[in-house]
Image (cartoon, rainbow, N blue to C red):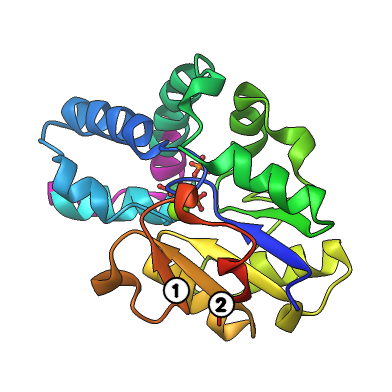
Amino acid sequence: MVKGCLFDLDGVIVDTAKYHYIAWRDLAKKLGFEFTEKDNERLKGVSRMASLEILLEVGGIKGLSDDEKQRLAAEKNENYVKLISQMTPDEVLPGAADFLKQLRTAGIGVALGSASKNAMTILNRLQLTPLFDAIIDGTKVSKAKPDPEVFLKGTEALGLQPSECVVFEDAAAGIEAAIAGGMRCVGIGSPEILGKANLVVNGLYEMNLEKLKLE
Ligand code: B16
Ligand code: MG
């Protein structure tokens, strides 16, 4: 029986990728190259510093010091935080709030498992914070997905075993993380990319308690 659900944030609950893109694209422009939406796909679910490395690779920029990289990542984040500080509850992806409420009513634990260090700001802006029993974000983990750390900490915070939990993820690395941690998982997006998930749906609007049994 499923006793807990763990949710990735970007791409599952909300589309923050568009704001990440604006902020990374502006940084690339300052560095003198173009960063396309296709390039941005490579950053989904990837941590901030790993995203910067990909951006620098796209721009062919080599040999920056660690201090310089930290400064660039901080500059991007400042720009990104300005954008997400304007978000409103109508940006919650279709069906997400309803499904979280259904889970709570059924007594199923709800946790966040996100790589973002800005997850709290986003959940507060979307007025979703009270729907989560536990929030594990980029400030609480040291290993990025596909390492299962973020989801294992989520199951622990809910007081559950991984086998009792289901992960919802839009990135292949997140599905790998769920499987590595011994959890079942639902992919949000395309079956070609998320084929290892137990079930793939287009969005949380397609989920309900019956489908959660994953039979
Ligand atoms: P931050 P998720 C991820 O969120 C994003 O998909 C990824 O693009 C971003 O680089 C990462 O969070 C870190 O975000 O810079 O705010 O700490 O999909 O794990 O919810
Ligand atoms: Mg994601």
4 vs 18: above or below = below
Q: Which residue is mark 2?
A: 214
Q: Is residue 191 visible?
A: yes
Q: Is mark 1 within 8 Å of ligand 2?
A: no
Q: Which residue ends up furthest to the front in the rendered image? A: 210
| Residue at the (43%, 56%) spot, across then down | 45
Foreground of the two, 99 or 86: 99
Foreground of the two, 68 or 52: 52
Q: Which residue ends up furthest to the top in the rendered image? A: 86
Disc sitting over residue 183 in the figure? none
Q: Position of residue 106 (x, y in %)?
A: 80, 55
Q: Residues within 10 Å of mark 1 (few under 14, many from 20)?
A: some
| Residue at the (73%, 73%) spot, across then down | 2
- Which quadrant of the figure has residue 189? bottom left
Q: Position of residue 123 (x, y in %)?
A: 64, 33
| Residue at the (47%, 47%) spot, across then down | 205
Q: Label 2 amino acid?
A: Leu
Q: Label 1 amino acid?
A: Leu
Q: Secondary structure at mark 2?
A: loop
- CA gap between label 2 and label 1 equals 7 Å
